[in-house]
């Protein structure tokens, strides 16, 4: 007998689970995005919104939901695109059946984000239509085409990112830079684009440096500035110790600038990371007018290091200056009876009194410390001429800096020359094919020379600062 084959047509849409014969309108939304806030992009953004509103409303079989938008945001990640995230959330909640957008690159330039989002939408019955490429994601060829187009869009984004990074590196190598003036204390942007001192803010910077050298801690300085009603660099009424530490450690205030302190490792991630040698840095000396003298800035850095090593907290002129005669640890202030105002008092004790050593030295009151200081000063004043003469002899013997300055100049020249040769070697390897074993050996030798010169230079500069400090 001859076989009879009869096709039973589908009655349910696989993607939407809706009856195929149903005449219900599809709920349609548009998505528009521009990656910058420039004026010409603004007109493109408005044109996209207007176009998709009219386009969707012009179809009788479509029901307009809304046009979701992201303005001035890159497409390399969906993390910070609030309009995109809201659109996906509404689609997963069943409020959208179809999303219409201009192109794959408008939707996402990250292949992983694009495909994962499309698949998630597809599982919940939402289709996406890319008008420029004419791709419907429910189509059997849709995902293959989408994968290809998303990869091309990602590579385009990579190319743009590399061009931007090249321009930034060129700007840095030329010693050019800019500041976030709205959050930077002490400087304004001049008419020529350079840094101009804001005298009112500069006085606050000088006060911070002066208070720190007088013995105050960053926390105490922040509290005093807050109490005096001085706004922070961000314009807020409260200061914190981290802001003070940033001001104290920023070389910009002595007229120099270290460029490329942070770097972005991945054009998709865009997360800024601290540069600990991963990419070249540029140090520009004397590029603008200083608020803090270089010698004062260096003294502050030494004091920061000293307090870090001895775990001291500043509060008075005696902070980080009193040491135990028994174990050599530092004395610090302690509050007794802190909850009872009648008996509350501050005393100074050895910081290792409650540690493993259990130092047995007695505590000191503020009055005892002051009296001891005055007594010691009076003894020195009684023999001041002899002390001054002895100090001058020592200074003449040990305080000469000519040899150190000459050595620093030599090492600085060695570092600069070696750095340029190393960069030329890297650039040549990028342009010309050569034996990589030989290249690696030469680059390792050159880098070792550069590191040795840099290390020796840092030691020589440290010795010079110590001598200058002792000579003051």
Image: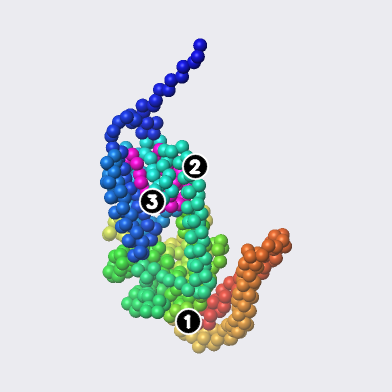
> Is residue 300 shown above or below 42?
below
What is the CA distance from the residue labelled 1 to the residue labelled 3? 83 Å
Mark 2 residue element: helix
In the rendered image, the residue lying farthest to the front is 2
Q: Earlier in the sequence, mark 1 or mark 3?
A: 3
Q: Is residue 117 magenta?
A: yes
Q: Residue 273, relative to residue 140: is it above or below? A: below
Q: Position of residue 4 (x, y in %)?
A: 46, 17
- Crowding near pointer 3: few (<14 within 10 Å), some, many (20+)? some
Q: Find disc 2 in the rendering and name its residue.
A: 144
Q: Is label 1 in a helix, a strand or a loop?
A: helix
Question: Relative to the observer, which residue lies in front, 285 or 51?
Answer: 51
Part of the protein shown in magenta = 96-122
State the CA–CA distance, disc 2 to disc 1.
Answer: 87 Å
Q: Is residue 417 left or right of residue 23?
A: right
| Image vertical order of residue 415 relative to residue 471, above or below | above
The residue lying furthest to the top in this view is: 1
Instruction: Please tell me which residue is depicted at 29% across the width and 54% down the height of the picture.
Output: 50
Viewer-proximal residue among 202 and 95: 95
Find residue 380 and name its label. 1
- In this image, 367 relative to 386: left or right? left
The answer for how far apart the CA atoms under marks 2 and 3 are is: 18 Å
> Dot 3 corresponds to which residue?
102
Residue 451 versus residue 65 in the image, above or below = below
Q: Residue at x 31, y 50 (%)?
A: 52
Residue closest to the eye, 456 or 280? 280
Query: Which x, y percent locates residue 261?
Result: 49, 65
């Amino acid at each position: 007998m001859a076989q009879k084959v009869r096709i039973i047509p589908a009655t349910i849409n696989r993607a939407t689970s809706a009856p195929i014969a149903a005449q219900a309108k599809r709920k349609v939304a548009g998505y528009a995005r521009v990656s910058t806030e420039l004026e010409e992009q603004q007109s493109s953004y408005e044109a996209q919104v207007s176009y998709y509103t009219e386009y969707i409303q012009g179809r009788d079989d479509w029901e307009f939901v809304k046009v979701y938008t992201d303005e001035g945001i890159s497409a390399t990640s969906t993390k910070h695109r609030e309009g995109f995230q809201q659109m996906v959330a509404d689609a997963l909640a069943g409020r959208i059946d179809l999303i219409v957008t201009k192109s794959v690159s408008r939707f996402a330039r990250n292949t992983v984000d694009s495909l994962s989002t499309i698949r998630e939408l597809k599982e919940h019955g939402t289709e996406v239509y890319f008008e420029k490429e004419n791709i419907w994601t429910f189509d059997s060829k849709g995902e293959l085409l989408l994968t290809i187009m998303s990869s091309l869009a990602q590579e385009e984004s990579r190319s743009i990112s590399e061009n931007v990074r090249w321009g930034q590196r060129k700007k840095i190598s030329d010693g050019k830079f800019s500041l976030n003036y709205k959050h930077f204390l002490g400087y304004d942007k001049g008419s020529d684009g350079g840094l101009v001192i804001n005298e009112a803010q500069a006085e606050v910077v000088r006060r911070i440096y002066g208070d720190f050298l007088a013995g105050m801690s960053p926390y105490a300085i922040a509290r005093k500035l807050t109490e005096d009603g001085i706004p922070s660099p961000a314009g807020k009424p409260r200061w914190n110790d981290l802001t003070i530490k940033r001001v104290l450690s920023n070389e910009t205030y002595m007229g120099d600038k270290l460029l490329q302190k942070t770097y972005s490792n991945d054009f998709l991630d865009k997360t800024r990371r601290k540069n600990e040698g991963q990419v070249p840095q540029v140090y520009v000396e004397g590029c603008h007018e200083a608020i803090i003298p270089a010698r004062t800035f260096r003294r502050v850095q030494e004091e920061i290091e000293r307090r870090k090593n001895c775990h001291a907290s500043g509060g008075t002129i005696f902070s980080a200056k009193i040491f135990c005669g028994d174990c050599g640890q530092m004395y610090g202030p302690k509050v007794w009876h802190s909850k009872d105002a009648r008996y509350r008092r501050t005393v100074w004790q050895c910081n290792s009194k409650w540690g493993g050593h259990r130092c047995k030295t007695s505590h000191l009151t503020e009055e005892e410390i002051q009296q001891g200081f005055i007594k010691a000063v009076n003894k020195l004043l009684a023999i001041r001429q002899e002390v001054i003469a002895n100090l001058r002899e020592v200074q003449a013997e040990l305080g000469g800096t000519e040899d150190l300055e000459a050595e620093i100049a030599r090492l600085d020249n060695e570092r600069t020359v070696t750095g340029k040769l190393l960069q030329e070697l890297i650039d040549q390897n990028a342009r010309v094919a050569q034996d990589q074993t030989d290249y690696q050996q030469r680059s390792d030798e050159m880098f070792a020379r550069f590191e040795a010169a840099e290390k020796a230079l840092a030691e020589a500069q440290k010795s010079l600062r110590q001598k200058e400090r002792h000579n003051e």
